[in-house]
Image (cartoon, rainbow, N blue to C red):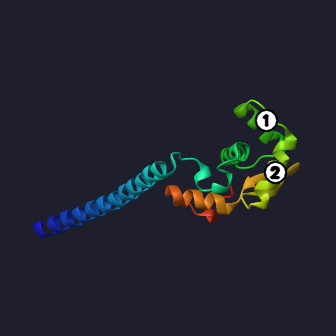
């Protein structure tokens, strides 16, 4: 009987130790991601998507459109223009169309079929690069967002 109690207790201790190891691994990954973010901030002075997409660094309208698409996932020209107007105070659909064409040509944005016409989204490559930069282990085969 005492040997069985001892064996059960050892088994429980092994299980607890394994749970602690798993928890430590998660905390370690989070600490690494946090340090990566601090390093990005120190290096670039910002923690925005434009860090992953340096082509838009000096174009405030394109930068804001990329941020809008990152927030909304998918949007048409009117939705982007409306959101842009709310954020910047002014926007036109013609300007949004022109900037979207530039962003598509750069491979930053893609045109995807929508329920009622064209909608736009960030390219998977841009989202993947951003998530890798900030240390988020998200696999695209698990999500339909991008």
Q: How many marks?
A: 2
Q: Earlier in the sequence, mark 1 or mark 2?
A: 1
Observer-nearest of 24 and 84: 84
Observer-nearest of 115 and 29: 29
Can you give x and y, in whole percent of width and height, for residue 21 in the image?
A: 31, 62
Which residue is labeled 2 in the image?
119
Residue furthest left in the image: 2
Q: Residue at x 45, y 49 (%)?
A: 42
Task: Name the quarter where the N terminus is drawn.
Answer: bottom left
In the image, is 37 to the left or to the right of 88?
A: left
> In what element is the residue under mark 1?
helix
Looking at the image, is 142 positioned above or below residue 34?
below
Q: Which mark is residue 82?
A: 1
Task: Name the quarter where the C terminus is drawn.
Answer: bottom right
Residue furthest front in the image: 58
In the image, is 39 to the left or to the right of 74?
A: left
| Badge 1 density bin: few <14, some 14–19, many ≥20, Cα 10 Å | some
């Amino acid at each position: 009987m005492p040997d069985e109690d001892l064996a059960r207790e050892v088994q429980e201790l092994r299980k607890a130790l394994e749970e602690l190891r798993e928890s430590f691994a998660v905390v370690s990954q989070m600490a690494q991601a946090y340090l990566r973010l601090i390093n990005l901030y120190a290096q670039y002075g910002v923690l925005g998507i434009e860090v992953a997409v340096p082509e838009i660094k000096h174009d405030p309208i394109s930068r804001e459109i990329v941020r809008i698409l990152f927030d909304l996932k998918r949007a048409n020209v009117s939705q982007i223009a409306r959101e842009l107007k709310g954020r910047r105070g002014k926007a036109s659909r013609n300007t949004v169309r022109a900037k979207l064409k530039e962003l598509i040509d750069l491979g930053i944005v893609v045109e995807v079929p929508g329920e009622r016409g064209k909608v736009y989204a960030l390219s998977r490559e841009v989202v993947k690069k951003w998530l890798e930069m900030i240390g988020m282990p998200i696999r695209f085969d698990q999500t339909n967002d991008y």
